[in-house]
Amino acid sequence: MRNKLATVSQQNNDNNCMEWLEIVLQLSDLKYLDIEKIHQWNKQFAYVTVVADAKRPTRLNNDIAWYQIGKDKGRSPVCNAMLINARRNWVLFLEDDESIRLGSIPANHSLDPQTWTPTLIRQEKPGGYLQYYQMRLVHATSNPIFDGKNLPDCTRYIRDNEIQLLNHSVVIERDSSPISHVDIDAELSLKNYSPRLYLVSGDRYFKNKKYVHAAAQYRRLLKEEKLLPFDRLGAVNGLASCYVEQYKWDKAVALSNESLNAESLQSLPYLIKYRIHELRKEWDESFKIIKQYYERFTLHSRASFDQIINEEKALVNLANVALKAGMRREATRYFEKLFVFKRDGVDRSLLKKVLVLSIELEDFERSVYLFERIFKDDLFGEINKETEEDFEQIMTMFMQREWYDYVSQVYNKLHNLYPENRTYKRKLIVALTKTNRLDKAKAMLTNIV
């Protein structure tokens, strides 16, 4: 029935069920409907309610509530309605394609009406992820607590009622953006809108390269008295990012340091400082900063709109900056970690870079291994000009390291495969001369016209 909550016929009494907690899933589009996941939640939580602007699908179990709403119904009003009609003291609100990391849900005894826990939302992106903080696990109440329309926020309620927030966070993961649906003008038209709206607005201005406008939004948020700590950090980091793009690098570094003093586990302040030192070509400092980042990147920060690059990208940055700073052994070490991380997915340019480093460090065994990994499939088949040039460069470096025996073996194979190729023949003669195989070198030399 439209705008009426369907009756739940029975409650799941499975021993693994979290009887104290119910789930409300809001779907903006039926493309996000994952019935198997919803059925699984029904086994893990006391109740599950799905909210959507569509009719109930026939495949959904009867003991899962379906709440059909109008297309213009905002998410905040739905949240408030669900809380007023809640069947348990605690409700966890989910959206669209979100998944719960079950192990992150706190024990019931650690929560009470005056002690809540925030929710960390991780949005997967190429090369890393973005993180957002919202209050999704909330205590049921008979009064509306969420402000806004499609950006539900209970900052005002938390501050007015002096609710304490745990350091622990519920972790939710998703692929879609949790803020792309927000209409800034529609939110601002309301009397009570979320202060987080300025973060959303600032983020959009920043992505459109309107850095002055973005900075103004972040400053406006920082003037708010009723503000949650992760939103404040998001505004500070956003303002620092604007300073970078406006070439106010000293201000950006100062603000990033201020942010890290408040919360040392963040990512974005480190990435801001790293980029500035890289732009200044201060390679030693760049390496120091990105190394500090790498040592912390697996930990969650308490900052909304934080940006995290994944391990692969961090290792590439570490290796490249170490190389520019003249730290060749450090660079090689991080390249090797990258190989372990990527296994067979390492591209040719990266392999060549590590091969050159290995030769310069006089590591013969690793150099031979990398050489054969790069050239084995191409060299003794059809070879293109670029591969030929790379091969000649590496062979020259091998000769400079006086690895003549191996060079002569390589050119001997090539000469046998391509006996008419005079370049290979001459290179083999040189290598044979260096290995004191003068008789064979002279015999080959007499055959060159």
Image (spheres, helix red, strand yellow):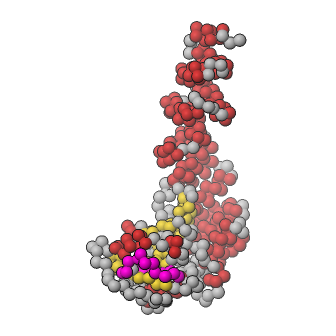
Instruction: Report which quarter residue 8 is drawn in.
Output: bottom left
Q: Residue furthest front?
A: 58
Image location (x, y in percent) of residue 67: 46, 84
Magenta region includes residue 50: yes
Q: Quadrant of residue 63?
A: bottom left
Residue 115 visible from this viewpoint: no
Please tell me which residue lies in front, 118 or 23.
Answer: 23
Q: Which residue occupies 54% across, 49% down?
A: 315
Residue in the image at 37% along x and 71% along y? 40
With respect to residue 180, does 429 lie above or below?
Answer: above
Q: Answer yes or no: is residue 259 visible.
A: yes
- Magenta region includes residue 204: no
User: Percent position (x, y) of residue 331?
Assistant: 55, 42
Q: Nearer the viewer, residue 207 or 320?
A: 207
Q: Residue at x 58, y 50 (%)?
A: 317
Would residue 130 appear left or right of 183 to someone viewing this image?
left
Q: Quadrant of the C terminus?
A: top right
Picture coordinates of residue 128, whole percent (x, y): 54, 59
Q: Is residue 418 above or below residue 189?
A: above
* Number of numbered markers: 0
Q: Position of residue 260 (x, y in %)?
A: 55, 64
Viewer-nearest residue: 448 or 307 = 448
Magenta highlight range: 48-63
Q: Taken as a whole, is the magenta stretch helix, strand or loop?
A: loop
To which quarter of the image does residue 231 belong? Answer: bottom right
| Horizontal side of residue 170 vs 123, given as left or right | left
Q: Residue at x 42, y 81 (%)?
A: 49
